[in-house]
């Protein structure tokens, strides 16, 4: 049985690699949405910070919600533990702690990403350069994921890292979706308008799902279908349902490996069952923001339960 400290290192290494990418995706969402409503860009950036869970921290030292200030906070500010630089630093620290459990290719990809991101984010990023920098962050983290997926033995080491990745990914997709309806629409009257549809397409681009959505729905950009795609579609690799199917699979492999099930197994499977049985019309009727807020809370509770069950200390 893997030591709890090692399991903890693998889990958080994977979570922070995913978080670095996800912060870039949230920044990309804010940038794209700000461009569609340039006269209210500060509202869009404030909502991105709220959805990222770092608005209070941001407001401790900043009161200007402009593109340069917010993106600097999301990408470079080491006082923000979820910034890209902070995340890749924490990921590398955890990777070093479990170095002997990783393949050479995985460790080298983590280390090379760390060096590349520190070079890239050494100075503030000018607004015209932001799209290229955000793409580079996503590319560097994708290279780590590719090395990990392509070289790691599918054992408990793989499973703990996979669980970390998918819990973080589910949290991020929910947060990116929450950006959409938190404060972005000027009023309820805009729902279903061309502005509303444009923003939904922006959300799809930010989770690299625009083309796959077009394949699935023949380009019909309907808010209900887009939400269904990112929440309930089990073939979309960044959806909530896909993430929870992967979490449950890895937890089941651990149960087989260790010969026992833990409370976290039941929690994860209960959430997957709810996602399988959910209907997107009911989600909208009950409130998309409320659904996503509940999901984010429950997802965090599952992470805490996993840490307790597998003694992450």
Image (cartoon, grey):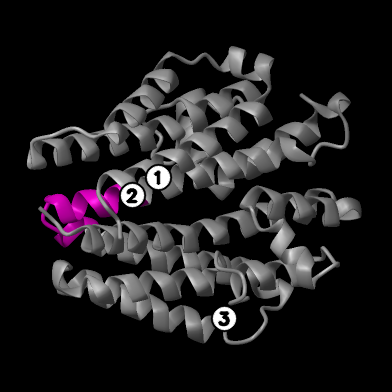
Give the residue number, with chain letter if any, for mark 2. Answer: 307
Marked residue nearer the N-terminal end (2 or 3): 3
Residue 262 percent coordinates (x, y): 24, 34
Image height of 80 relative to 149, above or below: below
Image height of 198 relative to 94, above or below: above
Image height of 170 relative to 112, above or below: above
Q: Please indicate whether residue 187 sits to the left or right of residue 225 in the image.
A: right
Element assignment for label 3: loop
Residue 203 percent coordinates (x, y): 62, 42
Give the residue number, with chain letter if any, for mark 1. Answer: 303
Q: Residues within 10 Å of mark 2 (few under 14, many from 20)?
A: some
Residue 202 percent coordinates (x, y): 65, 44
> How many numbered marks are there?
3
Element assignment for label 2: helix
Give the residue number, with chain letter if any, for mark 3. Answer: 121
In this view of the protein, which residue sits in the foreground, 149 or 210? 149
- How far, Cα to Cα, is label 1 from label 2? 6 Å
In this view of the protein, which residue sits in the foreground, 152 or 268? 268
Q: Is residue 154 magenta?
A: yes
């Amino acid at each position: 049985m893997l030591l709890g400290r090692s399991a903890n290192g693998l889990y958080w290494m994977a979570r922070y690699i995913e978080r670095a990418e996800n912060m870039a995706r949230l920044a990309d969402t804010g940038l794209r949405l700000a461009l569609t409503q340039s006269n209210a860009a500060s509202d869009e950036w404030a909502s991105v910070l709220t959805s990222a869970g770092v608005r209070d921290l941001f407001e401790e030292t900043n009161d200007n919600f402009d593109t340069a200030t917010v993106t600097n906070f999301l990408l470079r500010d080491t006082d923000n533990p979820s910034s890209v630089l902070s995340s890749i630093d924490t990921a590398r620290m955890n990777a070093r702690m479990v170095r002997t459990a990783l393949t050479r290719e995985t460790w080298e990809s983590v280390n090379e990403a760390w060096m590349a991101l520190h070079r890239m984010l050494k100075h503030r990023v000018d607004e015209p350069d932001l799209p290229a920098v955000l793409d580079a962050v996503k590319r560097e983290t994708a290279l780590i994921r590719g090395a990990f997926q392509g070289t790691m033995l599918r054992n408990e080491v793989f499973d703990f890292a996979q669980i970390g990745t998918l819990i973080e990914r589910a949290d991020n997709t929910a947060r990116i979706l929450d950006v959409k309806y938190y404060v972005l629409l000027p009023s309820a009257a805009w729902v279903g308008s061309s502005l509303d549809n444009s923003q939904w397409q922006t959300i799809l681009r930010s989770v690299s799902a625009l083309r796959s959505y077009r394949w699935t729905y023949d380009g019909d950009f309907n808010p209900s279908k887009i939400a269904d795609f990112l929440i309930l579609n089990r073939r979309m690799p960044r959806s909530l349902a896909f993430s929870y199917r992967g979490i449950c699979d890895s937890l089941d492999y651990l149960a087989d490996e260790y010969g026992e099930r833990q409370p976290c197994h039941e929690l994860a499977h209960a959430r997957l069952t709810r996602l399988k049985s959910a209907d997107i019309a009911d989600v909208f009727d009950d409130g998309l923001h409320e659904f996503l807020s509940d999901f984010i809370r429950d997802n965090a509770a599952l992470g805490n339960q996993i840490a307790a069950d597998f003694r992450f200390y």
